[in-house]
Amino acid sequence: MSTACASDPIAQFQQWLRDGAECGLKEPTAMALATADAAGRPDVRMLLLKGVDERGFVFFTNLESSKAADLRANPHAALCFYWMPLGRQVRVRGAVEPVSDAEADAYFATRARLSQLGAWASRQSRPMNGYYELETEVAKVALRFPFGDIPRPPHWSGYRLVPDEIEFWTEKPFRRHERVLHTRTAGGWQPQWLFP
């Protein structure tokens, strides 16, 4: 039986993520996040996955960003992971919910100091006059927090995509690819083979 048709798609995803890390990819956690605004206009951007378990897929962002505005207006999203050297792709769809403050604080504390300063300095998705403006804002924040721990900004947190569909795609010769869609039901995950 195909590994993509395993009974636990979260465990299968975790294994594929480990495989991606072991094959030497620089960012095996890289994923495309697709959202739609209140008018239904789609948007997509690359992010890094910061956690996955039976509850869902976690990522962090500035809550004043365009992606956060989309998620407030339409709390549903899709993710796409692609590990080219392995010929594997995973697509995920579901509802999105905020992570807890404790989760956001815990992750923020693990970030590099310069990344923490950047989270305070960046007015994400808003216009700026040039790159120097960001550097100036980072310098101001560095003066505000010269020593010790940097607290998480109130405008920075995370989201969890709670999947209701997870599709595994495996590249095969002559475009006869293998696709298995797992749909969450009241009784658990239901796999379904799909034509490529």
Image (spheres, rainbow, N blue to C red):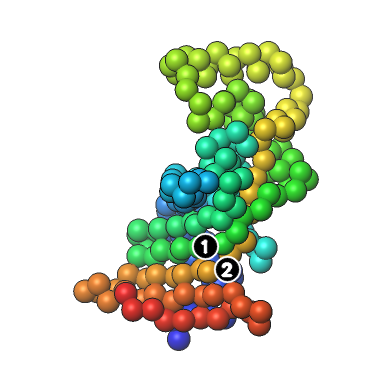
**Which of the labelled discs sits on residue 170, or is there none?**
none
Is disc 1 in contact with disc 2, using a CB cutoff of under 8 Å?
yes
Q: Is residue 101 left or right of residue 33?
A: right
Q: Quadrant of the C terminus?
A: bottom left
Find residue 189 and report its horizontal and vertical position in percent: 59, 78
Name the outermost residue toward the bottom: 1
At x 35%, y 59%, the residue is 85
Disc 1 target residue? 93
Mark 1 closeness class: few <14, some 14–19, many ≥20 residues within 10 Å: many
Specify whether residue 57 is in view: no
Find residue 102 and report its horizontal and vertical position in percent: 78, 45
Q: Is residue 135 left or right of residue 43?
A: right
The kind of residue tagged 1 is: Arg
Q: Is residue 104 left or right of residue 11?
A: right
Find residue 44 and report its horizontal and vertical position in percent: 43, 47
At x 65%, y 45%, the residue is 158
Find residue 104 and report its horizontal and vertical position in percent: 71, 43
Mark 2 closeness class: few <14, some 14–19, many ≥20 residues within 10 Å: some
Label 2 sits on a secondary structure element that is: strand
Residue 111, above or below 35: above
- Quarter where residue 12 is shown: bottom right
Whichever of labels 1 and 2 marks the residue nearer the N terminus, that label is 1
At x 60%, y 23%, the residue is 121
Disc 2 target residue? 164
The kind of residue tagged 2 is: Asp
